[in-house]
Amino acid sequence: MPKVPSSQLVLDAAYRCFCRNGYRRTTVSDIVEESQLSRPTVYKYVGSKEEAIVKVVRSLLERATAASDAAAEAAATAEETVLAVLTVKLEVAIRLWQDSPAHAQELLSAATAQAPGLVTAYTDHLAALLTSTLARAAGDGARQAAAVLLTFTRGLEEDLRDTDAVRDELLTGVRMITRGALASTTSTPG
């Protein structure tokens, strides 16, 4: 079995601490204890809880970006691509809500506050991916449709107590918005 790098052990420990205690109540000492590594080793990888959350967010968003790209590549139609990309985004939020029902909203706020550039870059990447997918079929309305789809998905992330219902709402919403955007380019003015 391959050895897990200390840096990953620290990030995994930080994530568990944030999920268990929330961002505000987590300390570097908590991360040291959770990781079962020495204090100097933990400080080598994260010098503060602010740095820890930025690195955790970066890791999560890098994985989500790769998964979105792979999902888009595997999909056959524009609608399937949009659904696949937004499902990956939604699943990141669902995982956080499942891992930390008591602190998910606080952690999402902390991630946005401590790593705004990372969150913006991730959202911009998704917007570009959706826009390029829709542009092939929807033309000029692709950017606006992508923005609506991302806003819709963010709205779904606000209440994830019933994940099956939210997944169904995503499917329905993506179908409605995507088909509307695609239909608007094929209709001719009367």
Image (cartoon, grey):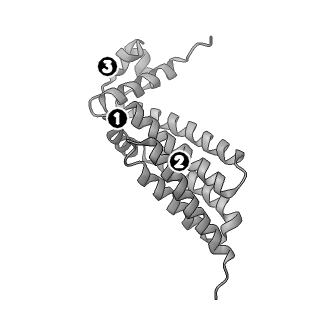
Q: Is residue 56 left or right of residue 127?
A: left
Q: Nearer the viewer, mark 1 or mark 2?
A: 1
First in residue order: circle 1 vs circle 2? 1
Identified by mark 2, the residue type is Tyr
- The residue beneath circle 1 is 101
Mark 2: few, some, or many residues within 10 Å (few <14, many ≥20)?
some
Residue sitting at 64 percent across and 85 percent down? 189
First in residue order: circle 2 vs circle 3? 3
Q: Is residue 25 left or right of residue 55?
A: left
Give how far across and how far down residue 24 sits, in percent. 27, 34
Count every numbered label the image shows and give the total.
Answer: 3
Q: What whole-number distance in Å separates the C-alpha atoms at marks 3 and 1?
A: 23 Å
For residue 6, the mark is none
First in residue order: circle 3 vs circle 1? 3
In this view, the residue farthest toward the left is 25
Q: Are marks 2 and 3 in contact (CB under 8 Å)?
A: no
For residue 122, the mark is 2
For residue 29, the mark is 3
Residue nearest the observer in this picture, 64 or 99: 99
Residue sitting at 44 percent across and 16 percent down? 41
Give how far across and how far down residue 116 sits, in percent. 42, 47
Q: Secondary structure at mark 1?
A: loop
